[in-house]
Amino acid sequence: DPNATVVENAPDPLADVDPRKIPALDIKISQLFQGDQLLGAWALKIRPTPTGMRMSDLSLGLKGILLEGDGAWEGAPGASSSWFKGRLAGKNLEDVLKAWNFAPTVTSESFEMNVDGRWPGSPAWVGLKRYSGSLDATLNRGQFVEVEGGAQALRVFGLLNFNSIGRRLRLDFSDLLGKGLSYDRVKGLLVASDGVYVTRNPITLTGPSSNLELNGTLDMVRDRVDAKLLVTLPVTNNLPIAALIVGAPAIGGALFLVDKLLGDRVARFASVQYKVEGPWKEPKITFDKPFEKPQ
């Protein structure tokens, strides 16, 4: 998205500020606005250090996100770096995405992410393309949805662009997935080096009708993904997995629903693996291989 690229590639707004000259400050703001939009309540303590400034007891409201932790900004103007260790959390991710003018591609009852990383420049210049460190995220009970209508014009938040994956899975497993990809929990641990993210633990989606595992590399600098997607679906003992592969997923969906309605415990889990390659905004998703997971 051009707008997202402009924001990400804009120069550091605090590039000319010397963090070593910032005095000790205790900041507490009950309502902080950005223009006419309420960000939330802010509280933090700033203390000088020999190399810059240290921030502690951070509690920052960011349009539905609560950011808590500690950080620092160190170095000379034009050659500084920042780090942060803490947690961000909130309720419905759909509302947060809309508040930040992103397409509302995900809903959730709650979400949180533990962050431990650093980036060049000031705290204000944090960005996915510059970040090095870990992101340990959990989403609880929601749905990945395809945006429609006017929302399609909004930029998609890079790490949450599951539109292409959702479209492919609905094509293959329409009876099970319907219009959205529902989940009970999504969890993943990503480790980044200068904007290149590797799944230290696979990104796992556990849902009422499917389990997904995404394992691989996401390069936010070059907008490339190279990953394997493992989709695990319940099928009956009487249905060979070949039926899913040759394009009869509706049979699997129908039999799965019958099993659920009758309470018959004859379902087993079969897995299909895809390759996910190319631009992250529109990757090529191709069938790789089928195999059954042990019960």
Image (cartoon, helix red, strand yellow):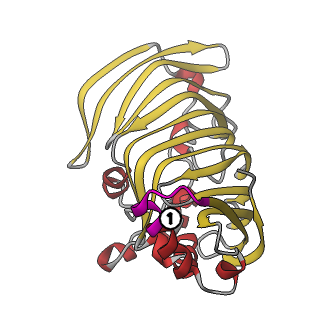
What residue is rendered at 38% in x and 76% in y?
A: 153
Q: Secondary structure at mark 1?
A: helix
User: Relative to 200, is 228 above or below?
Assistant: below
Q: Nearer the viewer, residue 71 or 79?
A: 71
Q: Percent position (x, y) of residue 259?
A: 48, 64
What residue is rendered at 66% in x and 40% in y?
A: 119
Residue 118 on the magenta segment:
no
Corner quadrant of residue 285: bottom right
User: Relative to 239, is 265 above or below?
Assistant: above
Residue 259 on the magenta segment:
yes
Q: Nearer the viewer, residue 21 or 178?
A: 178
Q: Which residues are magenta?
A: 258-267
Q: Percent position (x, y) of residue 241?
A: 70, 74
Q: Percent position (x, y) of residue 279?
A: 67, 73
Query: Which residue, given by chain and number where applicable, does mark 1 sit on?
Result: 4
Q: Amino acid at mark 1?
A: Ala
Q: Is residue 157 left or right of residue 60?
A: right
Corner quadrant of residue 217: bottom right
Q: Percent position (x, y) of residue 184?
A: 46, 48
**What count of labels does the image hold?**
1
Q: Is residue 291 left or right of residue 96?
A: right
Q: Is residue 225 visible?
A: yes
User: Relative to 80, is 151 above or below?
Assistant: below
Q: Nearer the viewer, residue 55 or 96?
A: 96
